[in-house]
Image (cartoon, rainbow, N blue to C red):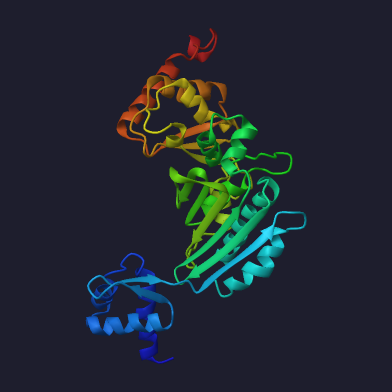
Amino acid sequence: MGKREDHNDEVRGYILENVRAHPKDISKLVAQQFHVSREAALKHVRALIQQRALAVSGSTRDRSYELLPTVDETWHFSLGEGLEEDKVWRTHVAPLLEGVRKNVIDICQYGLTEMLNNAVEHSEGQAVSVDVEIWPDLIELTVYDDGVGIFNKIQRAYGLDDPLHAILELSKGKLSTDSGRHTGEGVFFTSRMFDFFSILSDRIRFGHKAPDFDAMLEDAEPMRGTAVFMEISPKADRTAAGVFDRFSVEPGGFGFDRTIVPVSLARYGNENLISRSQARRLLARLDRFKEVRLDFRKVDMIGQAFADEVFRVFPSQHPDVHLIPIEANEQILKMIARTQANAEQEQPAPPKGTDGGR
């Protein structure tokens, strides 16, 4: 390949990587990046339109460009006996990812098979669809079933207050509605492997964005069943093994004994986290881990009772669980420090006859 072809590939690759963020001014961006005229930049854009890699819309002044997928395939399956997730992967999905990095293929295989297995064994539905869309800069996998809905299923299985409470429990990990057959790790690890992961069910959407940001939204229109969306860059360097290692306390260990919990999911709406009942909701099942990182992003303050339950009562009852606050503001850190200082003052004095009792 000559220098001219190499240059063309470089410019057009740059367009494909940046047009999502610059749909209206991509030619200007290219001209600045490669020190060429706007017309020369537009020639590359037009070439990508001819190759059906880009679509254009709007008039000259309001012209906008968007990526077109190179692959857009959907399959529909019955959730009756006989549907096997590994065969769906091997027969339909894997051939579409030929040439993609092995670490990305491994993540796609893990996520697709785990989410499809959840639909097969837990959804109580009749049908499931699998969709694969591939762009130059993105791979998106979608699994949709017509069952009872994941959040409703978790609420029912655990006797929770409502489906919103189910999202908090799901974010912790080790949650299964059939613990005799499943460890409850699939959703947790899948959400951490992909660049973006989202579950939509009824009116509720739970999303995770790499590296560690969780969010919950309520959509206006209810949706039957469960839809899972998984997105990853073909150039991602994350590995499935590396994600597993992040949540093991021992280096190179195999245990799932570390987790990260978004504290904001313990509240409803814009309420403040001040009560012991809110704290207990946050702390439920955390005794199953050795290390828990409590992520205080989007939390402005906590009350004394909440802090006391989390940072004094729980540690006294579960001394083997290490709670680590992260992303906490100064006010929250002061409340935590005050609570921990009170806990230290309440420690019983050493008995007489020991070094500390002289």
| Number of disc labels | 0
- Residue drawn at point x = 68 percent, y = 60 percent: 77
* Left or right side of 52 for 129: right
Q: Position of residue 259 (x, y in %)?
A: 53, 41
Given residues 97 and 81, the one toward you in this image is 81
- Residue drawn at point x = 58 percent, y = 38 percent: 152
Single out the residue that lies furthest toward the bottom: 2
Given residues 7 and 256, the one toward you in this image is 7
Is residue 36 visible from the viewing direction of this image? no
Give above or below for 340 relative to 290.
above
Q: Position of residue 323 (x, y in %)?
A: 49, 32
* Left or right side of 152 for 294: left
Give above or below for 153 relative to 64.
above
Single out the residue that lies furthest toward the top: 352
Q: Position of residue 258 (x, y in %)?
A: 55, 41
Q: Quadrant of residue 215?
A: top left
On-image quarter of the N terminus: bottom left
Given residues 145 and 239, the one toward you in this image is 145
Is residue 161 visible from the viewing direction of this image? yes
Give above or below for 351 relative to 203.
above
Q: Position of residue 42 (x, y in %)?
A: 29, 81
* Left or right side of 116 for 140: left
